[in-house]
Image (cartoon, grey):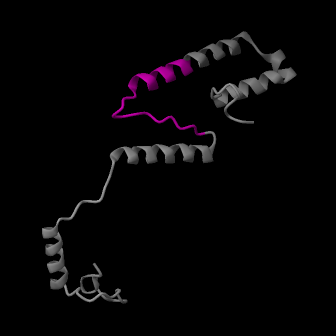
Amino acid sequence: MSPVPSGGRRIFPECKRRVARLRVRRAQNQRSTRAQEGGAAWDAYVRAYQDLIRETATPEAPWYVVPADNKWFSRIVVAAAVDHALEKLDLAYPKVDADKKKELAAARTALGGDKKQSPRAGQSCATSFTG
């Protein structure tokens, strides 16, 4: 059973449980007015929850509502949110001008890293800098 029905609205786990329970004949007979009042309270809770998220989310601090009833889908939602946040940062490697390159070359020479070699076991990075 898909967590998202054909209408596109997400069914909360509690709602799914209630619908399944209504389909069982014995449960239909045991349904009381108190349980129906509980359904109204659930609807009010869902409305309050949605209002809270809508009113407190800002572009600077958005909310990401991640469903916890499906582990693989939850992980996809979190990965997409992190990916989106990182893309908005517009990160780039720093630009190195000619003067800085000369300074780095001098530092490499001073550290004894002129030779292009890979580090050997027990050898420090300073003596095996490959630049």
Residue situated in front as seen by the camera: 104 or 71: 104
Instruction: From the top left corner, tell me how far across and down residue 33 is, in percent.
Output: 72, 10
Horizontally, residue 9 falls left or right of residue 82, namely right
Q: Is residue 90 above or below residue 43?
A: below
Quarter holding the N terminus is top right
Q: Residue at x 23, y 87 (%)?
A: 114
Instruction: From the top left corner, tell me how far across and down residue 130 is, in percent.
Output: 30, 81
Specify the quadrant of the image occupied by residue 45. top right
Q: Is residue 113 above or below residue 98?
A: below
Residue situated in front as seen by the camera: 21 or 84: 84
Q: Residue at x 25, y 59 (%)?
A: 94
Q: Is residue 127 above or below residue 26?
A: below
Q: Residue at x 39, y 47 (%)?
A: 87
Outermost right residue:
25
Specify the quadrant of the image occupied by residue 6. top right
Q: Is residue 58 above or below residue 89?
A: above
Horizontally, residue 28 falls left or right of residue 36, namely right
Q: Is residue 77 magenta?
A: no
Q: Which residues are magenta?
A: 45-68
Quarter holding the C terminus is bottom left
Instruction: From the top left corner, tell me how far across and down residue 55 is, in percent.
Output: 41, 22
Instruction: From the top left corner, tell me how far across and down residue 59 is, in percent.
Output: 36, 32
